[in-house]
Amino acid sequence: MTVTLLVPMKPPHVGKSRLRGALASPVSPGSPDGAGMRAAEVHTSLVLALARDTVSAALDTPGVDRVVVVTGDVDALTPLAELGAEIVDDRGAPDLNTALRAAEPLVRAPCGVAAGPPGAGGDRGVVGALQADLPALRSSDLAAALAEADGRRAFTADRHGTGTTLLLSAPGEPLAPDFGPGSAHAHARSGAVALTTAAASLRSDVDTPSDLRHARTLGLGPSTTELLGRAGAVPAAAHRPEG
Ligand SMILES: Nc1nc2c(ncn2[C@@H]2O[C@H](COP(=O)(O)OP(=O)(O)OP(=O)(O)O)[C@@H](O)[C@H]2O)c(=O)[nH]1
Ligand SMILES: C=C(OP(=O)(O)O)C(=O)O
């Protein structure tokens, strides 16, 4: 049984708007005069750092065959391709669930632009959706969730119990994503098994500065650690109310 994880991402300069302003301006890498980055660059760098740490951990997870980023901005996500992820265009999907539904048949196709290496994906494999904002993700936590799912359609709720950080299909069955506010309940109502493995790092998605501080207590991956190191401390509050 193969496992393909879809990682949906808006263009990085657009996504994760609740984190806008969360970091002070880090010193630009290689800047001779120690000049800081512009606010927009800081935000894009943060979104990409969160995604790099998430994707790296997913690629390192035993049992995960492919990590496929689904986005409206393929070029901006080249750094994730360099890690080993495949990048597919969401074809102008208007929302997250539509983007996932558009990508699912592509990765299940036995051949085609997103068919992946021979034997990977296919119409009998498990397809999952993994959030891109899990910078503390440990491969052992993701592997434990896959093991607990054991071929059932299943999900991991976020640490608040309301959102979903991972949704897995049953082999060869539709993913049927229902992300959005209250998605943990929506996925449970649609028959997905709620995974109970502790998996703190898999539950700790980062939507707000407070989430970022929490993820930091678990141990961030190298990209987010490096960026935060250059930016100094995460401020106590963002300029937007936390949701
Ligand atoms: N490809 C694609 N990804 C999406 C779309 N909408 C949301 N996502 C991604 O799905 C993930 C979860 O979405 P949200 O938590 O709502 O993230 P967000 O919209 O970037 O964050 P906020 O602006 O703070 O609400 C994020 O990685 C988003 O970038 C979409 O229309 N297309
Ligand atoms: C869209 C979701 O993600 P977030 O909690 O990151 O907004 C969700 O959990 O369904």
Image (cartoon, rainbow, N blue to C red):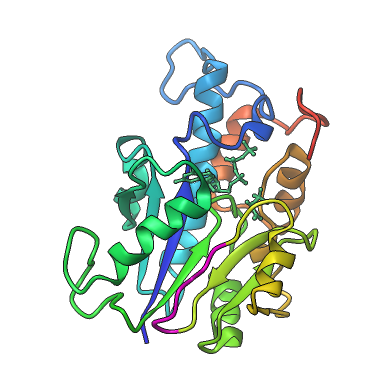
| Residue 173 falls inside the magenta stretch | yes
Front in this rendered view, residue 58 or 70: 70
Magenta segment main secondary structure:
loop
Q: Which residue shows up at 74% across the image and 66% down it?
A: 185
Q: Quadrant of the N terminus?
A: bottom left
Whether 194 is drawn above or below 135: the answer is below
Within the image, what quadrant is residue 188 found in?
A: bottom right
Within the image, what quadrant is residue 240 found in?
A: top right
Q: Which residue shows up at 59% across the image and 44% down it?
A: 225
Task: Please say whether residue 71 is visible from this viewpoint.
Answer: yes
Measuring from the top left, give residue 27's x and y in whole percent: 54, 21
Whether 24 is drawn above or below 92: the answer is above
**Which residues lie in the magenta part?**
171-177
Front in this rendered view, residue 236 or 87: 87
Measuring from the top left, give residue 85's x and y in whole percent: 34, 57
- Horizontally, residue 225 falls left or right of residue 6, namely right
Q: Which residue shows up at 64% across the image and 74% down it?
A: 190
Measuring from the top left, give residue 92's x and y in whole percent: 37, 40
Number of numbered discs: 0
Whether 223 is drawn above or below 140: the answer is above
- Horizontally, residue 127 falls left or right of residue 199, namely left
| Residue 48 falls inside the magenta stretch | no
Task: Please say whether residue 223 is visible from this viewpoint.
Answer: no
Q: Which residue shows up at 31% across the image and 79% down it?
A: 123
Measuring from the top left, give residue 57's x and y in whole percent: 49, 63
Q: Quadrant of the C terminus?
A: top right
Front in this rendered view, residue 13 or 25: 13
